[in-house]
Amino acid sequence: MRRLLVLLLLIVAHPAFAFVQGQRSISDIPTARETLLRTVNPKFYKTLLISPVEGWIAVRGQLNGTRLVNPRVVHSEMNGEYDSLALDLANNLHLEGNSNFGSLTNRNVLVHLLIYEIADGRLAVSFANFEDAGGSQWRYYGAAWMSVEKANHLWITINPYNLSRSEARGPRTYTFGVEAPTPARAPLPRAIGNKELPGTPQTLPR
């Protein structure tokens, strides 16, 4: 994780990744703030909060065991340039969860892909969440997928320093953890400093 943090800080330190007033950030992407809060490094998360999102692609699939079936793009930007990447990530996504997870069937999952302009290319960040009304109540953990696209369209994947034995990871593959909310567990902190993290409802078309 330390190597990952150093690389990310080098990426976002460049002026090309600086915040531009009035542009969209993860605060404008449904569930992005809540999910990325637990799945990227805290220092990098603070940068994402103020960094402009160049493009957002969303893929919807149905949960079948630990994988998704019938994935399709439901939100596309940047002239569809990254739709195939988002579909690959959805097709290769692995979901892990607690004992309540296995009872879920035919549940919609959204796989998000965010694109950022950086110094010498583009940074892609992907994460997933359940789409239903209670999806924001689930705890998502693990590490978001991240990769840098160089000017020659060469992708350099940024992997976590430590991986669990069951965690699948690759150029277009990642594992996301899901834990059901339980009354016995205390609510997770939802504030950073004096800012409340609002729950954002899903607004994507069906």
Image (spheres, rainbow, N blue to C red):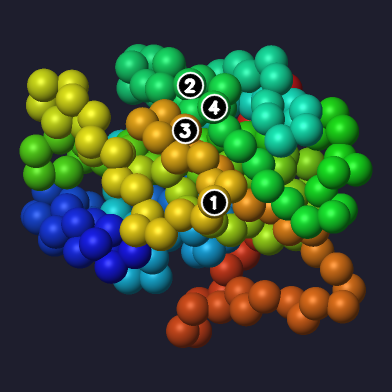
- The percent coordinates of residue 32 (x first, y second) are 52, 51
- Residue that appears at 45% across and 40% down: 169
Could you tell me which residue is drawn at 78 percent across and 28 percent down?
64
| Residue 6 in the image, given as x and y percentages of width and height | 20, 64
Report the residue at 14% width, 31% height from top. 150
Q: Are marks 3 and 4 in contact (CB under 8 Å)?
A: yes
Badge number at residue 165: 1
Q: Which residue is mark 3?
A: 173
201 relative to 147 in the view: left or right: right
Q: Which mark is residue 201?
A: none
For disc 1, the neighbor class at 10 Å (few under 14, some 14 to 19, many from 20) is few
How far apart, in angstroms, are the residues tagged by discs 3 and 1? 15 Å
Which badge, 1 or 4, is on the more N-terminal residue? 4
Residue at the far front in the pictured view: 165
Viewer-nearest of discs 2 and 3: 3
Give the residue at mark 4: 92
Whichever of labels 3 and 1 marks the residue nearer the N terminus, that label is 1
The residue wearing badge 2 is 88
Q: Which residue extends farthest bottom?
A: 194
192 is higher (above) or lower (below) than 141: below
Tell me the amino acid under the disc marked 2. Answer: Asp
The secondary structure type at the circle numbered 1 is loop
Mark 3 residue crowding within 10 angstroms, few (<14) / some (14–19) / many (20+): some
* In contact (CB < 8 Å): disc 1 and disc 4: no
Residues under numbered marks 4 and 2 in contact, where contact means CB atoms less than 8 Å apart: yes
In the rendered view, does 164 fall on the left or right side of 187?
A: left
Q: Nearer the viewer, residue 32 or 101?
A: 101
Which quarter of the figure has residue 51? bottom left
C-alpha separation, residue under disc 1 versus residue under disc 4: 17 Å
| Residue 175 as seen in the image, left or right of residue 206 | left
